[in-house]
Structure formats: structure tokens, C-alpha cells
Amino acid sequence: MKLRFRRTTSARNGFGPDAVEVEPRRLRVSSSSCATLAITGYPREVSPGWLEPLLTYPGRLDVSVHVEPVPSLIASDRLRKQLARLESGLRNDHQHGRLLDPGSEAAAEDAQELASRIARGQSKLFRASIYLTVHATGPDELDDACAQVRALAASLLLDARQVTFRQLQGWISSLPLAYDNLTMRRTFDTPALAAAFPFTSPDLTAELGPTAVLYGANLSSASLVAWDRFEQANHNSVILATSGSGKSYLAKLEALRSLYCGVEVAVIDPEDEYARLASSVGGAYLHLGAPKVRLNPFDLPPRSQHGDDPLTRRALFLHTLIAVMLGETLSNAAKAALDRAILAAYRSAGITTEPRTWKRRPPVMRDLANALAKDKDPNAKELAAGLAPYVSGSHRQLFDGQTTTRPDSHLIVFSLRDLPEEIKAVGTLLTLDAVWRRISNPNNRRPRLVVVDEAWLLMKDPEGARFLLRMAKSARKHWAGVSVVTQDAADLLGSDMGQAVIANSTTQILLKQAPQAIDRVTDAFGLSDGERQLLLSAERGMGLLAAGRQRVAFQVISSPAEHAIVTSSPQELTSYEEADL
């Protein structure tokens, strides 16, 4: 029996085939043939991504998964009845002296465990159906393809049956219409259903939590690469790549998708690349170097964040900041002179070790320079001379007064583009300190991501690198992750501090590498010959995600809407601006 459906003339301008010929066990759609197989049997235990081999089938295969939630009251009632039937059967076998059925025993145990999880609210029930539509050019080729797909399904302990006299309904059910016309369903609980989705890479076995982020498509299979940094031993990451290979694109895309998951993001942006992202999602944008935009490094934390001695903690940070500002490692005598001047500057503002004084207006950089100038120690005089550009010279704009803004948003971008090149490292350190104060607030804990773009600006200074390392080591304790992005691998791999930052980053992402740096990268990350060649010949957005011994090659993918937000291409940005006009 064959049925033929042909579109009318008025409908030919729409989407779809010109004709569909229905046979009992196959369809002929235009010039090709297809057949739908329904999954009727499932394995008892599965692992995450267990359906992924279906996506690696070399031929054309449409995999359709339909999911319908079961209300908790109905699920509990059904489980209670099912458990009663199973236990009744087991008791009946026992009373008549028959051997117990292992399958029935296992089913009863599973039903009892599932009922317990549903009662505690730890799981839910779903009705799910899986259909496989196989395509081929002719009937003979279709029969061979169906046999191969059934064999592949059997290797996964799936029973795939070719539907009879319902091929049209099966084909419609496999189309992206969210319409299950076959309704050949099976009950799944939450973990089993989550494991059924083939959206995980077989090369990454870590669990995915609510903060998982999609990085791209797996280059070795048809699966997707999703990764949750907050489920790892530490939450930090490093992105190493050459200029123009897509490292900032990936960092912005990860920040955007982290915002989707409720993660608060702070960005240190040296090149003003994140302005469009901040504008698109309603984030806060702080333009350091602009008129009347200042961050006072002498600010004490709010009263709610006061520790045992916030004054001492500020003094220690100021030691690091002054060393970066002067571009040198201070001698012991210079450190002693600086410590005296810092405490003297706070005393001049009426701030001492007494907690009641910590709410007073803090000093500024000019007060520190005056305290150094009054000190008779020659080291103090030398420090005061070194601070002159930041007090009365060309760099004073950033430090000439109290803090002017305290941004509070789900996305905070600190732009350093307008800062002179000589003080960008200073600006990076100041903004990291401001971000760290927010992260370490015990009264506002939530997952946070700190993106340090062009980290080489800070890593080239020993004190700046040391501060970044301390932050990377402590971030996990405050539910935060630091993402270090740099185009110069030598800045990280060429120093002990940089290697320590990498060692404290579970997630390591390598995009295209320069031939001059590939040997050092290969030795540092233990790359194989194939991985080395991949990084040398990688196209833009192609790279390697490594987490310990787990590694996967991937290609960054984004939707058109995401691409419009994160792209830095001048040509594309110009076209977007013209379209907005």
C-alpha cells in the first residue's frame, strides 16, 4: 500500500518537500528515502553522554528526543502502584516456593529508591521518547543504513524498532516541530534524562553544574564541549594564544554565557573591547583615565567587611602598589621608610588602630608623598621623588582625590584604554584590588568570575605578578574564579610566578600558538605531536581545552546575537553602528 501527498501550486513557495510517498516501512521524500526507528528498550544504568555515539554516525541520521514532565503527585501515585505490583509478585513467588526473579528484585529496588528521591524533592519523573530517522538515496541503501543504526543502538543496549504503518507519523516526530506523533514513551528520572542528552564531550568527564558554560563544538566528534569551572578543584583558568586567534572573543563569550547562569563578572579591559558587552547586558562601565574618575588606594573596606586589622591589610597592599608604580623592588630600608609614611598619612587623617576611627575620610596619595618628604631618611626622600609624577605630574589624574565611583552591577568593566601605557600595570592592580574587595565580602557570597585581559601588563612586574598569584590562590575560598588572558605565553611560562598561576588554574585553554613559542608551550603542557600541530595550524577560534589529563580540541561557536555583542572586528562594528543609525 502506498499513499502519495503532493503540495498544491499555492504552497510550493514554502518550506518542505514537493511530495511524500508513504510505504509501510519507509517514506520517499522528494528524491530520497527515509525510515524512522523508535527506541523501545533501554539499559538499566547509563553514563553521561551515553547517546553521543549516535551523533557520530557517519551517515545522515536525525535524532529526536521528546520530553514531557510528569507532575509530582501523579509520579508518586504511579510509583506507589508499580512498587505494590512488584512487591506483590515477589511475595507470591516466595509463598509458592518459586525462585525469585532477579529482574523483578532489581526493579523493586529501583522503584523504592526513586520513590524516596521524589518524596525528598531530589528528583522528578519525565516521559521521554527517542526516535531515529535514517536517510538514504534508495530503498536498498536505506535497508543497509537501518541495519547499521540498529547495530549501533544495540551496542548502547538500546532496542531500536522500525515502525510499521506509522512512518509518516515517525518522520513528523523527528522534525524540529516539538510534536510527538508516535507517543512511544518511557519514564525517566532526572539523572537518567540528563545523561541521555548527547551534549557532552567524551573527552571531558567532569560533572556539569548550574554554572556550566558551552565553549564550542568538539572537533573529534559531533558533540558539544561544555565545562563548569566552579565544579573543579579551583575555579581559575588561563587562555594563551597569539594575537588575532580569538582569545578575547572566547573570553567575552564565556563572560556573557556565565552571566546567563547567574555568575557575577568583573573585567579588567586594557583595550576597551568589552564596552559593547557591558552596554548590551546593562552592566557598569568604569572608564579609568577619564576626567574625574579616580580610585583611592587608601580606602578602608566598609564596616561590614572589617577584619581583625584592615589598616594593616591596606598598608600591605600599598607596599605592593608603590613598588609597581616605581617599577622596582624596594630595599628593606625603603620598605621601612614607606611603612612609616603610610601610617603617618593615616594618622594625619585621624585614622589609627582604633576601630572607631576607621569610618573617617581616608588620606590620598598626596598625603603619603608629604609624609615621605618630611621623613629625614634618604630612602624616604627618594621614594617621594619617585611618586612626584603621580602626585603633581602627568600621572596625577588617577590619584588626585578621593574615589569618585563605586560600581555595583552583575557585570563591571574597568576600561584602561585611556591610561598612559606607563601606568596601565598600576591601573590593572588598582582595579584588581577593587574587585577583590567585592569578592572577599562575606555578606555577599555568590559565584564570581574575574577576567584579566592582556595579563602580560601585570605579569611583567614582579610585584604585580605576585599579587595576581595571591588572588588566584585565594579566589576559590570566596567562590570566585580568575581568568587570565594573554597573547604572550613567555610572560607566564618564563617566570616562576607565571608558572605558579598556571599551576593554580585547573582550566587551561590553548588557541593558536606562534612557532617561536610552541616548544615552550609543548614542554609546559605536555602536548602530543598531534596537539602541537593542531595549535600551530589552528584557525581562528580553534584550540585545545585541557584540565589535567583530560583534553579536547574544540571550535568556538556562537549565535548571531552573541557574535554581534562580542566581536571586535572593525569592519563588523562599523556595519553594526551604521545599522543602528
Image (spheres, rainbow, N blue to C red):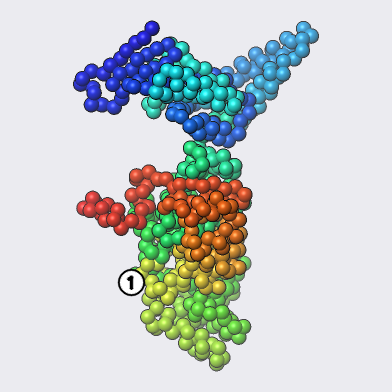
- Residue 535 place in picture, x, y as percent: 50, 54
Q: For the point 49% across and 42% down, which residue is it?
A: 218
- Residue 349 place in picture, x, y as percent: 49, 78
Of residues 15 and 301, the one nearer the viewer is: 15
The quarter of the displayed image where residue 269 is located = bottom left
Image position of 239 with respect to 297: above or below = above
The quarter of the displayed image where residue 98 is located = top right
The quarter of the displayed image where residue 80 is located = top right
Q: Which secondary structure, mark 1?
A: loop
Q: For the point 39% across and 83% down, which residue is it?
A: 392
Of residues 246 and 485, the one nearer the viewer is: 246
Type of the residue with mark 1: Pro
- Residue 420 place in picture, x, y as percent: 38, 74
User: Is residue 295 shown to the viewer in this render?
Assistant: yes
- The residue tagged 1 is 291
User: Is residue 266 shown to the viewer in this render?
Assistant: no
Q: For the point 37% across and 59% down, which residue is it?
A: 273
Q: Total label count?
A: 1
Image position of 212 with respect to 449: above or below = above
- Residue 165 place in picture, x, y as percent: 43, 11
Image position of 416 with respect to 117: above or below = below
